[in-house]
Every structure is written in structure tokens, then in C-alpha cells.
Amino acid sequence: MALPLRVTGLDVRSPRGRTILSVEDLQLPAGALLGVRGPSGAGKSTLLYAIAGLWPQAAGAVHWGDTDVMGLGEARRTAFRAANIGMIFQDFLLFEELSAQDNAALTSLFRPRDRRRQVGERARTRLAALSLPETARPVASFSGGERQRVAVARALAHDPAILLADEPTASLHREAADRLIHDLTALAKDSGTTLIAVSHDVALLSRMDRVLTVQDGRIARGESGVA
């Protein structure tokens, strides 16, 4: 089940105490696709990590549904992410010596024993939907586009309500990026997942329901689409 987002009074500070991101109010309905754009260093990735509860020097409220992740202790925050959030990174973060299936099903190791088979089966289904055939060869031999699709399958294997992507197409050539954009947005819509993607890629942003611009640590007002 997708979760709506509401951020209020978010203030993210650097280790030295300088405010690097300030969000007065941000709301997103469940199942929506949100793009986040802006210049390098503006605070885009900081926003992504803050709403995932991964930024310790932050204050304010980040509600996913009825849960304020900022109000949770570290252990409960980690448990919330494990249950509800899938993350896709620019640099893939795969185990090179493992196969696509083993990488995609990696989160099953952190699940109760009775759910591990289910995660493994869903990982196989996601890989197939992303046109990655079953193979025992390690992902070290995969192309960049194939590796990123493995990362997408891993993020979706536990059927998360929320999918957060940080520059998912930045390391890909145009053809691979376009294919990933189609697959990623289609899978998010089919599963009703709330997707938030930080990107400079106009092709990806054009597939979002809404696009925000982050500049100088703040969200520009009135952003509702790609210019």
C-alpha cells in the first residue's frame, strides 16, 4: 500500500550547524510520482535522505501516512525503512560477485524466515519484468543499464510503499536511460508505489506527475511540471 507524504518545518543542518535544507511544507498523495530537480549542491539529495530518515542533523516532521519518521528512535526508524522504503542509487551499490537474482533478493536476508521465500520470488518477478533473464553470471559482467535494472529490482523486491531514487539514470547512456525510465515509472504505477526521483534528466522528469525545483536549500514555489 502506497503512503502519502507530508513534510513540515524540516530543517537539515550540516555537522557544523549550518542549515543546508529548509522545507516549510511539502505534501504528496499516495502513489504519486514526484521529480526533484535543481543545480548541483542545492539540496536535492539531502531532501531525499532526510525524508528517508537518514539525516541525523535534522528537525521537523516527516510523515509517511500516520508515521513521523523524525519522531522515531534509530532502531524503529531503521525498521520503518526496511518495511516501507526501497532506494535506488546512482552508483548501483551491487555486490559484483553475486548474480542478479542474489543481488535483487538481498533484502530477504533481513526478513523473518517465513518471508524470505516471498521476497526471493518477487525479486525474480521484478527481474523478469525488467527484461533481465535468469543467469548465474555475476553482475560484474553486466552493462551499466543492466546493473541499474538489478538495483531497481532489489529496491522493489520487498514490495515497498515508497521508492526513492537518487540520479538513477546519471551513469547510463541515453538508450539505457530511456529504457530504465520506462520500466521504473511503469513498475511504480502498476504497483501503486509513491516514487520520488532526484534527477537532472529531463526525460525522467517529464514522466513524473509533479516536479519541484530545489535551489539554495529551499523548494521554489509554484512548481507543478517540467518547464
Image (spheres, rainbow, N blue to C red):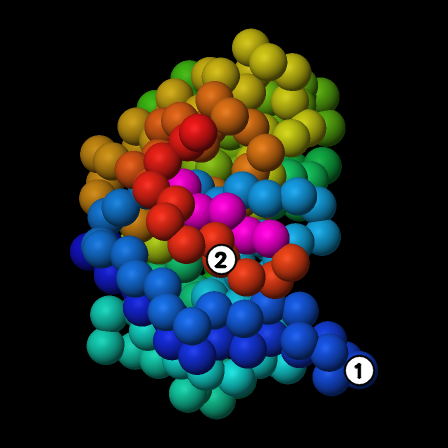
How many marks on residues? Answer: 2
Q: Which mark is residue 219?
A: 2
Kind of element beneath mark 1: loop
Residue extending farthest front: 222
Q: Main secondary structure of the magenta part?
A: strand
Foreground of the two, 143 or 7? 7
Between the residue at mark 1 and the residue at mark 2, the CA separation in whole angstroms equals 22 Å
Query: Residue 29: horizontal and vertical position, in percent?
Result: 22, 55
Callout 2: few (<14), some (14-19), or many (20+) C-alpha neighbours within 10 Å?
many
Quadrant where the N terminus sits is bottom left
At 41% across and 87% down in the image, what residue appears? 71
Q: Amino acid at mark 2?
A: Ile
Which sits in the foreground, 62 or 101? 62
Locate residue 44 relative to residue 61 in the image: left or right. right
Q: Residue furthest right?
A: 16
Front-most of 116 and 104?
A: 104
The residue under the point 49% across, 57% down is: 219
Work out whether 68 lies above or below 123: below
Disc 1 designates what residue?
16
Residue 202: give x, y in percent of width and height. Answer: 51, 25
- The magenta-colored residue range is 211-215
Q: Secondary structure at mark 2?
A: strand
At 64% from the left and 22% from the top, the residue drawn is 172
Q: Quadrant of the C terminus?
A: top left
- Marks 1 and 2, the one that precedes in the sequence: 1
Q: Amino acid at mark 1?
A: Arg
Image vertical order of residue 187 relative to residue 27, above or below: above
List x then y, in percent, for residue 102. 54, 40
Q: Is residue 124 visible?
A: no
Q: Magenta stretch containing residue 130, yes or no?
A: no
